[in-house]
Image (tube, rainbow, N blue to C red):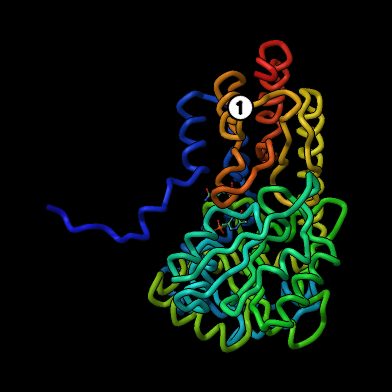
């Protein structure tokens, strides 16, 4: 008989993003589920990768990342946010934000340490924490406006709390946290000496507002020391398949992160790091390029919102990211998973249910997530299919 597997595996479900994409492909439905653009990245980015390969950058990179990319990240931080990170001691290149998150929790948690996670939360957060021996403690955003209840956050801190984890701009809601909400996070972390782990993969995709990293808002060395920032190239440059990410942290945390990272992947693809450095340097010198891209996405967002409203859903207006979360209680009486299945089977539009973004046994909003980082043609097909809901839906069952 085969040996028994790790107990940790029992709680792991297949990723909702893979499940929904597979179903959408099988049915030939319009895929507004998984968060990736169905349009291609720009040519200069592809050329940079091709050139890196043809000019011989094909052997292992240093484990912490190439000097070229770490310098480009440092310059990007300085130019966009006025923040100083030293390439040699504060920056580590990872295999996407996914590995950055995993490595960070392996580096900072001991068995039984608690991490307060602002919910709804990205699906990889819970396994990252529990596989590192930690305990996931949810702090649910409240009301239809997904606000942070600062007093609730404070009440969750115990002697075992080690960190607060959240995404800003947020996935799935597209919320950009207000200064007041960030103040609650910082005050709580400071008074209990907690790390703040902030996932900023949508940092450049903001609509009518700017992303403000915590150390920029609270310009004090003690605050910067507590904050571990994670980002990646995928969303900014429409290259989600490249899996180039990074972690910015103080020197001690960076050493620990590098110690873990060397035994997870050792190093990240060399030519893609060279290309990533070129892409980042390009926006550092031409910030309008990324602003214009965000404006293009905002038009897509607004188009989708109009349709969502026309079929009776109530959208939460996202200030950042790829997604619109919309409440369906006026038109459908089942769960989020059931409405997602309904849209997929009846309207041939794939969306993501909110259940996987929440821990078990919490009450969920009656809402699903739509992704708008899609070709105009794809959005138009989705709009046409969704519009048919008015004719065919079985409202309030
Ligand atoms: N964090 C969040 C909030 C995400 O939405 C995603 C998906 N892009 C990731 C992390 C993973 O990023 P990457 O593809 O760079 O691993
Ligand atoms: N971040 C993407 C989303 O939220 C999915 C990435 C993945 O499939 N792991 O849809």
Q: Is residue 75 left or right of residue 103?
A: right
Is residue 59 at all visible to an observer of this figure? Answer: no
| Residue depicted at x 47% and y 60% | 127
Is residue 41 visible to us here? yes
Rendered-image quarter of ligand 1: bottom right
Left or right: 355, with 373 as reference point: left
* Residue 355 placement, left or right of 223: left
- Between 335 and 108, the residue placed more toward the observer is 335
Tell me which corner region of the image, top left, top right, bottom left or bottom right, holds residue 342: top right
Image-based side of 358 in relation to 328, left or right:
left
Q: Position of residue 28 (x, y in %)?
A: 51, 24
Q: Position of residue 329 (x, y in %)?
A: 72, 30
Q: Judge the density around disc 1: few (<14), some (14-19), many (≥20) Cα neighbours within 10 Å.
A: many
Residue beneath the point at 65% across and 52% down: 120
5 or 84, which lies in front? Answer: 5
Q: Which residue is mark 1?
A: 349
Identify the residue at image location x=73%, y=36%: 326
Pick the quarter of the image with the C terminus.
top right
Q: Position of residue 70 (x, y in %)?
A: 60, 77
Q: Classify mark 1: helix, strand or loop.
A: strand
Quarter of the view holding residue 63:
bottom left
- The correct choice, above or below, for 222 with respect to 364 in the image is below
The residue under the point 81% across, 24% down is 310
- Which residue extends farthest top? 391
**Location of residue 237 (image quadrant):** bottom right
């Amino acid at each position: 008989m085969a040996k028994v597997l790790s107990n940790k595996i029992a709680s792991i479900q297949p990723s909702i993003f893979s499940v929904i994409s597979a179903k959408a492909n099988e049915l030939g439905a319009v895929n507004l589920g998984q968060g990736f653009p169905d349009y291609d990245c720009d040519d200069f980015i592809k050329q940079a990768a091709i050139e890196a390969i043809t000019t011989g950058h094909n052997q292992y990179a240093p484990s912490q990342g190439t000097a070229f990319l770490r310098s480009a990240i440092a310059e990007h931080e300085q130019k966009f946010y006025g923040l100083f990170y030293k390439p040699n001691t504060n920056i580590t290149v990872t295999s996407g934000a996914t590995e950055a998150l995993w490595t960070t929790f392996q580096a900072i948690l001991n068995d039984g340490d608690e991490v307060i996670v602002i919910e709804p939360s990205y699906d990889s957060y819970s396994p990252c924490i529990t596989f590192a021996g930690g305990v996931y403690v949810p702090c649910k955003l409240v009301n239809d406006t997904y606000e942070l209840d600062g007093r609730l956050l404070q009440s969750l801190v115990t002697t075992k709390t080690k960190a607060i984890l959240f995404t800003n701009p947020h996935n799935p809601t597209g919320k950009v946290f207000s200064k007041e909400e960030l103040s609650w996070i910082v005050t709580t972390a400071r008074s209990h000496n907690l790390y703040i782990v902030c996932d900023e993969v949508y940092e450049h995709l903001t609509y009518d507002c700017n992303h403000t990293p915590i150390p920029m808002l609270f310009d004090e060395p003690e605050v910067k020391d507590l904050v571990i920032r994670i980002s990646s190239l995928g969303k900014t440059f429409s290259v989600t398949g490249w899996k180039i990410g990074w972690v910015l942290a103080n020197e001690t945390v960076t050493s620990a992160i590098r110690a873990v990272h060397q035994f997870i992947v050792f190093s990240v693809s060399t030519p893609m790091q060279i290309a990533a450095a070129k892409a980042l340097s390009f926006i550092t010198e031409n910030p309008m390029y990324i602003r214009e891209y965000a404006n293009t996405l905002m038009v897509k967002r607004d188009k989708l919102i109009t349709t969502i409203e026309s079929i009776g859903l109530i959208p939460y207006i996202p200030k950042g990211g790829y997604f619109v979360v919309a409440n369906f209680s006026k038109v459908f009486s089942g769960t989020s998973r059931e409405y997602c299945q309904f849209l997929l089977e009846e309207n041939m539009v794939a969306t993501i249910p909110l259940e996987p973004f929440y821990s078990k046994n919490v009450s969920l909003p009656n809402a699903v997530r739509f992704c708008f980082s899609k070709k105009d043609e794809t959005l138009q097909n989705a709009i046409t299919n969704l519009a048919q809901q008015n004719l065919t839906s079985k409202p309030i069952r």
